[in-house]
Image: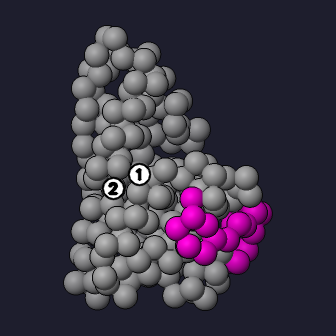
């Protein structure tokens, strides 16, 4: 059994889609959801699905290896970031080489980096007049949005689109692709053991 942990900071809609996807897969499961935000709605979603949760502080995450100890205690094999806003520290990247993935709501390398998340990204796409946007799934390294890209999907952006309508298109791509890509990456990591 491959045990997956999801890190999320907000609503958790992606986290829920991923967890529900893996409920139908016998050899992989979302075993833990972690957040740095005690008020995040993802905690309610996890509770409704019967998935254990842990809340940690930014200080614990950055200045100690508490979170790594939690992952080891729960025998976590693979880590998924789904709307998680903190930079992953080096100790965690080293403990899970090519086993931490993130999704970004734009076509990296465009609109990546610190502070580029959610509606800020869609606003930047709109202001630049881009004709397409999309999602990028990438391995995580110790710099924002710079890990190896493993998958991209695109959607058109029209002159009529607003940041909100671009967000809807991008969310649809996230829900459609992220769970399957995670499964493929886990299968690949198992083969490479």
- Quarter of the figure with residue 92: bottom right
> In the depicted view, which residue is nearer to us: 82 or 100?
82
- The answer to whether residue 141 is seen in the rendering is no
Query: Could you say where residue 149 lies in the image, as x and y percent from the top left?
Result: 31, 54
In the picture as drawn, the residue positioned furthest to the front comes out as 48
Work out how far the residue at label 1 is from the one at label 2, CA to CA, in angstroms.
8 Å
Residue 78 appears left or right of 134: right
Q: Secondary structure at mark 2?
A: helix
**Label 1: how many residues lie within 10 Å, few (<14), some (14-19) or many (20+)?**
many
Q: Are marks 1 and 2 in contact (CB under 8 Å)?
A: yes
Location of residue 56 (image quadrant): bottom right
Residue 81 in sight in this render: yes
Up the image or down, 33 lies above or below 119; here it is below
- The percent position of residue 182, horizontal first and vertical second, equals 33, 65
Quickly name the residue at label 1: 103
- In the rendered structure, which disc, 1 or 2, sits on the residue that comes first in sequence? 1
Quadrant (top left, top right, bottom left, bottom right) of the C terminus: bottom left
Residue bounds of the magenta highlight: 45-66
Q: In the rendering, at what x and y percent does residue 10 appear?
A: 61, 49
> In the image, what residue occupies the spot 36% across and 17% down?
161
**In the picture shown, does residue 47 fall above or below 31?**
above
* Image vertical order of residue 60 relative to residue 151, above or below: below
* Residue at 42% in and 31% down: 167
Q: Secondary structure at mark 1?
A: strand
Q: Please state the horizontal and vertical placement of residue 2, each as a whole percent of the image.
A: 38, 83
């Amino acid at each position: 059994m491959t045990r997956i942990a999801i890190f999320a900071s907000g609503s958790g809609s992606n986290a829920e889609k991923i967890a529900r996807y893996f409920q139908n897969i016998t050899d992989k499961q979302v075993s833990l959801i972690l957040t740095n935000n005690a008020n995040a709605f993802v905690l309610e979603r996890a509770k409704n699905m019967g998935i254990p949760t842990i809340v940690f502080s930014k200080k614990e995450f950055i200045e100690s290896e508490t979170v790594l100890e939690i992952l080891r205690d729960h025998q976590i094999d693979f880590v998924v970031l789904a709307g998680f806003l903190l930079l992953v520290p080096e100790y965690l990247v080293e403990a899970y080489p090519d086993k931490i993935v993130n999704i970004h709501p734009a076509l990296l390398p465009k609109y990546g980096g610190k502070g580029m998340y959610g509606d800020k990204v869609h606003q930047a796409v709109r202001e630049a007049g881009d004709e397409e946007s999309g999602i990028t799934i990438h391995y995580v390294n110790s710099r924002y949005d710079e890990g190896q890209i493993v998958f991209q999907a695109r959607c058109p952006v029209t002159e009529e689109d607003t940041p909100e309508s671009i967000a809807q298109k991008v969310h649809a791509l996230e829900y459609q692709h992220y769970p399957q890509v995670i499964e493929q990456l886990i299968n690949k990591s198992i083969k490479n053991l």
